Amino acid sequence: MFRNLSGDGLGIAGRLSEQIELALSFGFQGLSLDLVEFQAQVARHGLPLSRRLIESSRLKIGTWRLRLELAAEDESFDAGLARASELAKLAGEIGAERALLRVSPTSDRLPYHANFELHRRRLDQLGSMLKPFGIKVGLEFSAIAEERAGGGLEFLHSLDALALLVGMVASDQIGVALDFWQMHVAGNSLDDLRKLPPSRWISVTLSDAPLESPANGLSPSQRLLIGETGVIDECDCLRRLADRGYHGPVAVAADRSATQSLGREPLVKLAGERLSSAWKLAGVGAMPARALAGQR
């Protein structure tokens, strides 16, 4: 496993050079990449020059976001898949092997079983497209009740349901993005990790949750930085991942409303310190010298 800086997860933005500097300064070993923005940079300056900054930093690329609507109308989905193919080719060239793709918890046109079959079929298409480039995609689910309260037909909103879908997809390029805060909201336990082999775990996100608040009623603003309350035991999560042989990125996420008193650099510093501390307490690997230096 490696500690991964996700700007999206922490609600921060900045140029690639700035995010690389933050990652190197505060104990991260990788970072998530805005591949659409990077693609535009490649179009302006060429791939060798564009990738030089990442290569010189020796940071791993943790994840990138795939913007594809799985439940779109056929014509729109086909066009989106073609655009995704261009991104996947670029991702393969720079070693960005893990993509994220959100699954909507509702549908405005299809009942559950029809939507499930549509997703299964299209995920097989997506997996076949990604395989030549060596890209795997982790599916994200949302368990937040208010996202299903606005109408529409309910769809997947728990790890159990997502694991069932992934298990029925023939392509082994398709897996799950493990978000322990969403699992907490959905009522999943760490034992539910056994429902999929580690080869299908594409990424991991750690957060904390407030005390004395019903999990199933949490809102996005109640996604806290790890180590705030201990409601979600990040050390136990890390041990479970390590015990099963997970080797991918581990990012920290918190809603910006919960960290608004912190500027960008202090926030990344605190997130890095807490993740590194959890890493050490969980006993999942020694801290590299560069990470220790970044925290002095």
Image (spheres, rainbow, N blue to C red):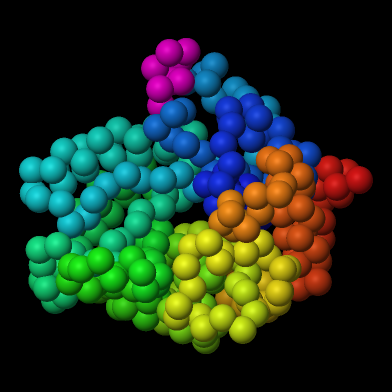
Residue 12 vertical placement versus 219 (above, below)? above
* Residue at figure coordinates x 66%, y 30% from the top left: 18
Q: Position of residue 20 (x, y in %)?
A: 66, 34
Question: Can you tell which quarter of the image residue 39 is in?
Answer: top left
Residue 293 vertical placement versus 121 (above, below)? above
* Relative to 167, 22 lies left or right: right
Q: Position of residue 199 (x, y in %)?
A: 46, 67
Residue 186 colored in magenta in the image: no
* Relative to 215, 210 lies left or right: right
Which residue occupies the extreme top position in the image? 45
Q: The N terminus is located in which quarter?
A: bottom right
Nearest the viewer among 168 and 148 is: 148
Q: How many marks?
A: 0
Q: Position of residue 234 (x, y in %)?
A: 67, 72
Which residue occupies the extreme right position in the image? 296
Per the picture, the main secondary structure of the magenta-coloured stretch is: helix
* Relative to 90, 266 lies left or right: right
Residue 143 vertical placement versus 194 (above, below)? above
* Residue at figure coordinates x 52%, y 47% from the top left: 8
Which stretch did the figure color magenta? 39-46
* Residue at figure coordinates x 28%, y 40% from the top left: 84
Residue 248 vertical placement versus 188 (above, below)? above
Nearest the viewer among 22 and 149 is: 149
Residue 159 appears anywhere in the view: yes
Q: Position of residue 280 (x, y in %)?
A: 81, 66
Nearest the viewer among 131 and 253 is: 253
